[in-house]
């Protein structure tokens, strides 16, 4: 394997889930890094697997699967479930797995996970050398006391939340004869904050100005009349912080 290509793959940061099934070969579990929430309404989860894997075969057979987001206390089981295959080893006999019966599917679920989601297969899509199985969640439970395992060049803890410093992020968009100036004030003091906005020529000279008040999430928007064709600079000021954007009419 090309070392540069392997390094590129390891540059991504993902979580990991146990995918559980119960097919004609019996119950099974595997670790799957490529597991994603892909829709809110309906609640859909996509898991991307090798088509030749025992788990993929069981999903094709039963049209259902379980998703169990791995918590830090399950890291030994995570490695074990990823290194062995059901075709060789009955992994769920290990005491590292605490089995829960599914409420609406036959596949077993795993106690100690951050999230357990029972899924019925909705779509199967071949994607390169993997297959994406998209399932609709029909039952789920969350344990907020658990912390997920993060994969980035190896297994890592979630770590401390990054506190965003006070900033203004601004975008300028032409909408017919107006310019929409919209953006976000970041930081702990961002709600109900006044933002002063102006459009000026690159070399100086104010063309238009206005103000907006951020909502509870720190977002703002204002419409100003579009200037004559040309290049302009847009500035947003919220207290002592400034954000800028480029505008071409």
Image (cartoon, grey):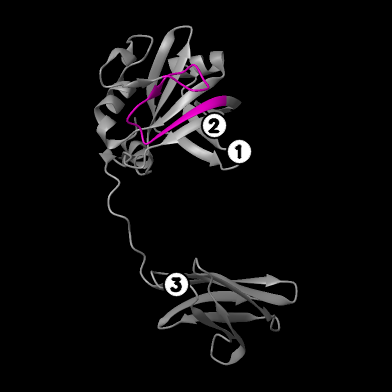
Which of the labelled discs sits on residue 21, or is there none? none
Sequence-earlier tag: 1 or 3: 1
What residue is at 50 percent from the left and 39 percent from the top? Answer: 37
Identify residue for label 1.
Answer: 42
Alpha carbons under labels 1 and 2: distance apart: 8 Å
Q: For residue 89, what is the image quadrant? A: top left
Magenta stretch?
Answer: 101-120
Alpha carbons under labels 2 and 3: distance apart: 35 Å
Question: Quick one: SS at disc 1?
Answer: loop
Give coordinates of residue 119: x percent, y percent.
53, 27
Which of the labelled discs sits on residue 137, or is there none? 2
Q: Is residue 171 visible?
A: no
Q: Could you classify mark 2 by the number of other residues whose Cα lies within 10 Å: few (under 14), some (14-19), or many (20 or more)?
A: many
Sequence-earlier tag: 1 or 2: 1
Q: Could you classify mark 3 by the number of other residues whose Cα lies within 10 Å: few (under 14), some (14-19), or many (20 or more)?
A: many
Q: Is residue 231 left or right of residue 88?
A: right
Question: Quick one: SS at disc 3?
Answer: loop
Identify residue for label 3.
Answer: 190
Whether tag 1 and tag 2 are in contact, CB under 8 A, the answer is yes
Question: Quick one: SS at disc 2?
Answer: strand
Magenta span main SS: loop
| Placement of the N terminus among the 4 image quadrants | top left
Give coordinates of residue 55: x percent, y percent.
45, 18
């Amino acid at each position: 394997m090309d070392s540069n290509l392997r390094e590129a793959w390891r540059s991504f940061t993902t979580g990991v889930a146990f995918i559980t099934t119960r097919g004609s070969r019996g119950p099974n579990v595997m670790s799957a890094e490529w597991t994603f929430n892909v829709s809110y309404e309906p609640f859909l989860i996509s898991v991307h697997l090798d088509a030749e894997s025992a788990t993929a075969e069981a999903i094709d057979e039963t049209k259902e699967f379980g998703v169990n987001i791995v918590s830090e206390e399950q890291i030994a089981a995570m490695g074990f479930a990823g290194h062995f295959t059901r075709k060789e080893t009955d992994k769920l006999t290990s005491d590292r797995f605490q089995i829960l019966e599914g409420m609406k599917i036959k596949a077993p679920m795993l106690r100690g996970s951050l999230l357990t989601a029972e899924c019925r297969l909705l779509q199967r899509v071949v994607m390169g050398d993997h297959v994406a199985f998209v399932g609709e969640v029909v039952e789920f439970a969350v344990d907020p006391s658990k912390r997920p395992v993060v994969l980035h060049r190896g297994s890592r803890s979630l770590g401390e939340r990054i506190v965003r410093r006070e900033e203004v992020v601004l975008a300028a968009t032409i909408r017919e004869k107006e310019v929409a100036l919209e953006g976000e004030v970041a930081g702990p003091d961002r709600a109900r904050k006044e933002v002063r906005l102006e459009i000026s020529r690159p070399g100086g000279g104010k063309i238009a100005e206005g103000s907006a008040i951020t909502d509870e999430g720190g977002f703002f928007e204002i419409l100003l009349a579009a200037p004559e064709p040309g290049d302009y600079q847009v500035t947003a000021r919220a207290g002592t912080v400034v954000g800028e954007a480029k505008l071409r009419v």
